[in-house]
Image (cartoon, rainbow, N blue to C red):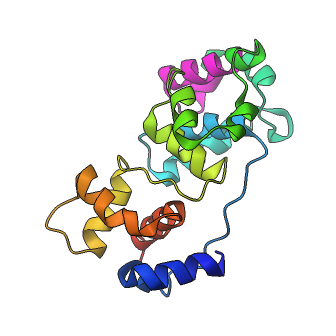
Amino acid sequence: MHQRVIEHFKKVDPVLYSVLDKIDSLKPLTKSNNYFSDLCETIINQQLSEKVGTVIFNRFKKLFPKGKITAEKLLKLKDEEIRKIGTSGNKAKFIKELAKKIHAKEVNLERLEQLENEEVVAELTKLKGIGQWTAEMFLMFSLGREDVFSYGDLGLRRAMQKLYKLPKEPKKAEAEEISIKWFPYRTYAARILWRSLEV
């Protein structure tokens, strides 16, 4: 993680900063080189634990030559092949639908790089199977945006409750109030919070 980010948290939030001593160093955010693969992974991982999601996505990768996931190759797979790896029929349908739109050039994922965060969310949530959370994960981990926070994420709310000794999980307004001080590095704050649940 960049020193400027660490210094920012040290200055604005001693509670969050104190977690940095207890976790491994976080790598700086980078842009992905396969947005389609990322969206497939996020859709497959919806409502699954990280461990289970990783197992299923690794099986998914093995369906592609050399593990290179593309829309064209996905369209050649039968729905049954995708379901056999342990993902649901609905999720198989969603990623197939996304592949069709990309293949037909109805969707251009590269174009999202030029849009503001809110515009990216608006574009992605037009697609079946992609909601607010999936779009936010895409902003964080595919586009490498530094100031994104997913207020609907259960893990983040639990981490905030634990770290800030709140009587219950914070609702959106309370979470926003806590997180505003992290601007413009809320993505890094989210990553610290997720890691705090492991220590």
- Residues 9 and 70: in front is 9
- At 37% across and 59% down in the image, what residue appears? 156
Decide whether residue 164 is among the magenta residues. Answer: no
- At 50% across and 53% down in the image, what residue appears? 148
- At 53% across and 38% down in the image, what residue appears? 135
Q: Residue furthest top?
A: 104
Where does residue 177 sit, x and y in percent of width and height?
29, 62
Does residue 44 appear in this view?
no
Magenta-drawn stretch, dominant element (helix, strand or loop): helix
Decide whether residue 84 is among the magenta residues. Answer: yes
Where does residue 144 sit, x and y in percent of width and height?
66, 54
Where does residue 47 sit, x and y in percent of width and height?
41, 40
Disc tally is 0
The answer to which quarter of the image holds residue 36 is top right
Which quadrant holds the C terminus? bottom left
The answer to which quarter of the image holds residue 114 is top right
- At 21% across and 75% down in the image, what residue appears? 165
Does residue 115 appear in this view?
yes
132 to the left or right of 104: left
Which quadrant holds the N terminus? bottom right
The answer to which quarter of the image holds residue 25 is bottom right
- Residues 118 and 19: in front is 118
The magenta segment is 81-100
Residue 160 against residue 56 in the figure, above or below: below
Where does residue 64 sit, x and y in percent of width and height?
79, 32
